[in-house]
Image (cartoon, rainbow, N blue to C red):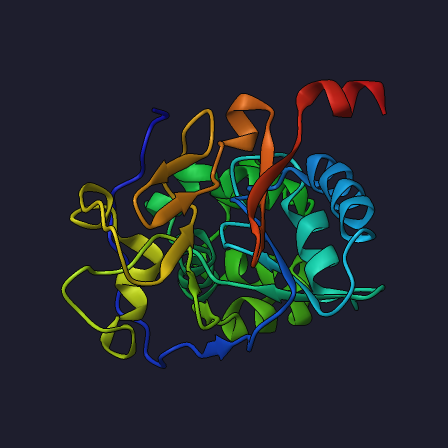
Amino acid sequence: MLGLFRKQPRPASQPRSRVNLGEPDVIYAVGDIHGCHRHLQVLLDKIRQDAAQFSGRKVLVTLGDHIDRGPHSAAVMDWLSAPFKGDIERVSLAGNHEAMMLDFLADPDLESAWLRNGGEETLTSYGIDLPAFERARQRDRRAMLDFVVPADHVELLRSMPVMATTGQAVFVHAGIRPDLPLEQQTDSDLVWIRQPFLDEVRADGPLVVHGHTPAETPVIAGRRICVDTGAYATGALTALRLTSGGYDFLQATLQDITTR
């Protein structure tokens, strides 16, 4: 198991939206991208090739933590902000790192835990000179951020839904609180929870597809599947393909990147 981040965020002032996907014929759920833009592009090519075998409605869900830790968060945000071409719909969920970045943009405190958990890499990807940023006064740091982080990126961070559902599956960043119905789940739990969610192995109920807790391979435990394979550390970015006939996994690996 890879290292885990445990700090809890401030409560959001406005609850995030939840999306009903209906009943797509095929869904691809991509685990935590964490600034690994090159892996993402390779994985998207594999998803498009794989999706060509299916007819009907196709949906791509990215499970949050698109940013931080990896080298190209700004490029990932550019991809998220641009129209998604082709016959696959895209839904991008919020994770705890999106929430932390929003907090930092509002209050660029150098003591922020975000900086120590991938935020510095994200700032660098936007062209921030970290030593100059650290020397600046807080109001000047905010001005630097306003200058380099596009307004549409900030709006996207604010508008990402926190949950997507079908009749049979729930897609969230971190997981759900086991003792609560879906409509009572809080945004904070959906993007931050680990326990008791990870310890409960359910035999029934909706399938929960999530990221947030990285492992070297996808984790299947009862009615949950985790597809966060720690791309920034392991070199493997993973997607789950889910259809009425079952599921399978697609990956972009470090070898794929180096031979592309």
Q: Position of residue 257 (x, y in %)?
A: 76, 25
Q: Where 146 falls versus 258 (above or below)?
A: below
Q: How many marks?
A: 0
> Closest to the observer: 87 or 17?
87
Give the answer, above or below, for where 83 lies relative to 184: above
Q: Give the quadrant of residue 15.
A: bottom left
Q: Residue furthest front?
A: 245
Left or right: residue 72 versus residue 120 is right
Residue 12 percent location from the top left of the image: 32, 72
In this rendering, would 117 be left or right of 19?
left
Residue 241 x/y as whole percent: 60, 48
Q: Is residue 132 visible?
A: no
Q: Is residue 178 left or right of residue 47?
A: left
Which of the 4 quarters of the picture holds residue 186? bottom left
Q: Is residue 78 above or below residue 257?
A: below
Would you say 123 lies left or right of 172 here?
right
- The answer to whether residue 58 shows anywhere in this view is yes
Residue at left offset 43%, top offset 63%: 169
**Residue in view at x 52 percent, y 42 percent:** 68
Residue at x 75%, y 46% (from the top left corner): 44
* Residue 145 on image: x %, y %: 58, 58
Where, quadrant-wise, is the C terminus in this rendering? top right
Tell me what residue is drawn at x 85 percent, y 64 percent.
86
Question: For the N terminus, which image quadrant?
Answer: top left
